[in-house]
Amino acid sequence: TAGKTITCKAAVCWAAGEPLKIEEVEVAPPQAHEVRIRILHTGICHTDEYTRSGKDSEGVFPVILGHEGGGVVESIGEGVTSVAVGDHVIPLYTAECKECKFCKSGKTNLCSSVRVTQGKGLMPDSSTRFRCKGQDVHHFMGTSTFSQYTVVADVSVVAVDKAAPLEKVCLLGCGITTAWGAVVKQPGITGSTVAVFGCGAIGLGCIATASLVKASRVIAIDTNPGKEAWAKKFGATDFVNPTKLPEGVRIQDYLVELTDGGLDYTFDATGNVHVMRQALEACHKGWGISTVIGVAAAGQEISTRPFQLVTGRVWRGTAFGGVKGRTEIPGLVKDYLEGKVKIDEYVTHHQKLADINNGFHDMHAGDCIRCVVDM
Ligand code: AHE
Ligand code: ZN
């Protein structure tokens, strides 16, 4: 198949707000510094739904969504040296070229090498490798894992140990890595108090990681009472349901009271700008640090009284947990294989590609942490 166009099935989103449609698509061979991957499994993340729904200011259509995949390298373009045919790989929506100003800064994982074209749904040469019914179809986040075959830039993929089941480690493509990185790269968590707002996959990942690095207390917050058992299973010491507080008591005031002045570290894993404010204001005066992880809808803005910052609270955020995928994901896979990082526990639902829209419905149900689609 190398060098030839492959025809396969993919879930195409033809227009904002429409359900995905399973179509036969043509996937062109990888060009120089590109890799064609046979995707075997992919998670569904709220960001896929966010873009499908039309809320993403970068959304372009038609598009093949999906950014939490695992697969096998089918063929490589000229000049590709970092992965080989047959390698098990995870596509990376945050590339790592190791050469740009960002990669070399030592301060961020936000590689700039392919980000501009990626944001337009195109490959680095500004064209697409997908066609369907005579039309070009856009890429998404540089990954497009809702296709049986996809093409990605070589800076946007990492090979992983074949001993790790792809149906599990595909989740390292987004949620679990994001949560792990957001916590593990925040200095000072060990021995400190932590609150995590939102107990979806990202929130549970933050709870698990805070517990792994031995935070002294990990308070989980969610409006769904069903999440208490989940949070405790992942290592939360406390669970607070903001809808069950006495009349007129705000969650941030409740938490400040509960923790003798506020949390050392808080994390927003909801994408709700009001919750982001609560997370900041639940921080301890003088030193509390709040990290925004959730993606808010286009046009949303955060606000708080500047006094919150003047009095020593810090508001920050991370993308992909600050993780440099090519450098760090192999180590995370090792941690998983050694039982240090949970992955299996997040998978509550499976769907076949033909039923991928059901996976989007699953995601909205409170009992779903992650749905894995088998391609
Ligand atoms: N395109 C959106 C923003 C989307 C966004 O913030 N994406 C996150 C990853 S979400 C994973 O589920 C991210 O890491 N962004 C960094 C980047 O470079 O895109 C918008 O609002 O325009
Ligand atoms: Zn995601």
Image (cartoon, rainbow, N blue to C red):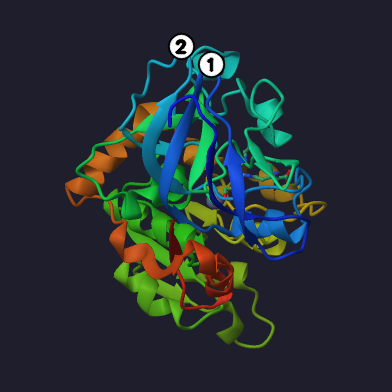
Q: Quadrant of ligand 1?
A: top right
Mark 2 or mark 1: name the one nearer the start of the chain: 1
- Residue 300, horizontal then vertical, whole percent: 79, 54
Element under disc 2 = loop
Which amino acid, by three-letter code, is at mark 1? Ala
Residue 26: image quadrant is: top right
Image point 75% across, 50% down: which residue?
56
Q: Is residue 373 visible?
A: yes
Q: Which residue matches tag 1?
A: 32
Does residue 362 sit above or below 275 in this rendering?
below
Mark 1: C-beta under 8 Å from nearest atom of ligand 1:
no
Where the N terminus falls, by quadrant? top left
Q: Nearer the viewer, residue 253 or 243?
A: 243
Percent position of residue 183, x then y: 42, 46
Q: Residue at x 44, y 37 (%)?
A: 37
The answer to whether residue 142 is above or below residue 303 is above
Q: Is residue 96 visible?
A: no
Kind of residue at disc 2: Gly
Where the C terminus falls, by quadrant? bottom left
Question: Position of 166 compared to 49: left or right?
Answer: left
Find out whether the residues at labels 2 and 1 contact each other: C-beta distance under 8 Å: yes
Label 2 sits on residue: 79
> Height in image: 374 above or below 127?
below
Callout 1: helix, strand or loop? Answer: loop
